[in-house]
Image: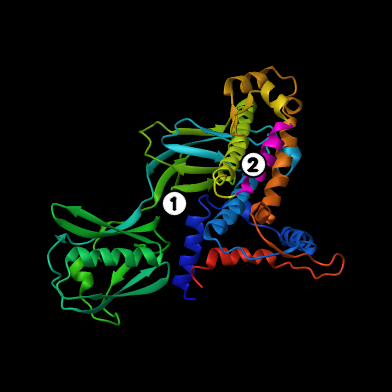
Amino acid sequence: MSSIALTNVYNNYLTTYSPKTVSRHDTHKKSELRGVYNSIVKMNKEAPLYLPTTSKETQNYAVDLKENARELHNTLAELGGLDQQGLLSKKSAFSSNEDIVSATFVGEEITDGSTPEFDIEVQTLASPQENLGEFLDSNGSVSLPADTYSFDVSINEMNYEFQFAVGENETNKDVQSRLMRLVNNSNIGIHADLVESEGQSALRLTSDSSGLPYGKDHIFHISDDHTSKSSGTVDYFGLDYTSQEASNAKFTLNGDEHTASSNEFTVGKQFEIKLKGITAEDEPVHVGLKEDVDSLTDNVSRLIGGYNAFMRAASSYLSSQARSSNLVKEMRGIAGRYYNSMESTGLNMKEDGTLEVNPSLLKETALQSEDISETFSYLKDFSSSLLRKSDQVSLNPMDYVERKIVAYKNPGHNYVSPYTTSAYSGMMFNSYC
C-alpha cells in the first residue's frame, strides 16, 4: 500500500467509526498491552467457532460498539476512575471569559494546598495558510491545451506530485472541481474548496494546521517548475498565490510574552488552553481552579454524560441488531443498582435508560454533606461497574452480535486463538484491500 492509500484507510476509520478525538489514555504501557493480550487469550480459549460476519451493517455496529466503549473508558479515566479512590476528586478549571479562552485542568491531584492560576492576554490567534486561486469564468473553456498536467506540493518536509488530465472543451469549474477532489482525497494536510461569485469560481487551498513551522515562512508551497508532466496549471489557476499567511498565536501569561503554533496548548502540564478570541486591552482572562463543590458537580455531570453517550450509541441499533437490547438491559441494570442513592442526590433515570442531573439538588446535597466522599461513595462503585463493562465490550463486542456457531471446542484439549479479534482489522480495511 502506498502512504497516501494507507492514510486514506486510517482517515476512513477515524471518520466512520471514531467520531471522538484520541486522548492521552489511548497510550499504554507494555504491561497494560500484555494484560489485554492475556485477556483475549483467556476469552477465546474455550469460545466456540463462529461463521465470519459479512454484513457491512453488522461490522459497523461491532466496531462502533468497540469505539464507544473506548470512549466511555477514557471518560472514566479522565475522572480518575481507573483508581477508585481518585474518582470525583478531579479538579475543574474555570475561565473568567469562556468566549475568549477555555481551560481544562489536566494536572495531577493538588496535595500541597496551592491553587495554580494565571492571567492570559491574547494578542493574535494562530492562523492557517490559505492560497486563493484566480477567479475564472465557471462555464468558460479552459485556456490550456488538452494534455496531462502535474504540479508539486511541498508540505511537512514531504513532496507530493499531483497528476491530472485536461480534456477538450472542459470548463474551468470542471477542472477546478477535479483538483479539489484530488487534493482532498490525498489527505496530505490541505483542504480544498471552491469559492464562487457572480459566475466565476476559484480554487482555495487551506492548511489543516496553523502557525509557522520552525525556521520557515510558509506551511506549504506549490510549483510546477520541475514537475514530471506538462506545466502551466499553477499559473493558470493561481495555485501559488498566498492570500493569507500562516501565523502563530501571540499571548502573555502573567505579563510574560509567549507564542504558539496552535490555538490549543498546555500550560505548565496543568491546564489545556484553547484560544478563541482576542482580549480587550488591559482586560486579561483569569484561569484557575473551581471550588471543590463546583468541581464535584462537573465531575458527576461528565460521568453521567459518558454513561448517556454509551447508552444512546447502543440504543441506536435496537431496530437493526437484535442482541443490542442485551447490552442496553445490562447498562440499565448497572444504573438500577444505585438508583435509590442517585435519586436522593439529584440523579434520575429516564424511560430510555439514560440519566439526567438536577444540578441544584446535586449542589445542595454536596454543600449540606459533612463528608462529600461518603455521600457520593456509591458513584465510585457505579464507576467501577461501568469500567468493567466498557472493558468487556471493548475486548469482545461480538458478544452482542447475532452469529451462527460452527463448532464447539473440545474442553480442555484445544489451542488458544489470540488472533480472533484481528477480525476487526478486516472490518475496517476490507474496502481497501
Give the residue at x 30% y 63%.
Answer: 180
**Residue 61 part of the magenta segment:** no
Q: Is residue 278 left or right of residue 132?
A: right
Residue at the spot of label 1: 262
Residue 187 visible in the current orientation? yes
Find numbered disc 2 in the image and state the secondary structure of the residue it sits on: helix
Query: Three-letter amino acid code at disc 1?
Result: Ser
Q: Who's the residue at 13% across and 55% down the image?
A: 199
Mark 2: few/some/many CA within 10 Å (<14, 14-19, 20+) = many
Quarter of the rendering containing residue 202: bottom left
- Residue 217, given in percent of the width and then of the height, sits at 34, 62
Query: Residue flagged by tag 2: what amino acid is it?
Result: Val
- Badge 1: how crowded within 10 Å, few (<14), some, or many (20+)? some
Between disc 1 and disc 2, the foreground one is 2
**Residues rendered magenta in the picture:** 322-337
Q: Using the image, determine if residue 405 lies above or below residue 330.
A: below
Query: Quick one: SS at disc 1?
Result: loop
In this view, 116 is above or below 318: above
- Residue 183 sits in quarter: bottom left
Q: Between residues 316 and 259, which one lies in front from this camera angle?
A: 316
Q: Residue at x 65, y 51 (%)?
A: 400
x and y, in percent, of residue 261 in the image: 43, 53
* Residue closest to the far bottom: 228
Label at residue 328 = 2
Quick one: label 1 or label 2, which is nearer the N terminus? Answer: 1
Closer to the camera, 223 or 340? 340
Main secondary structure type of the part rendered in magenta: helix
Q: For residue 299, what is the image quadrant?
A: top right
Q: Where does residue 205 sit, x and y in percent of width and height?
A: 30, 60
Q: Position of residue 237 (x, y in %)?
A: 20, 66
Q: What's the CA distance linking mark 1 and mark 2?
A: 40 Å
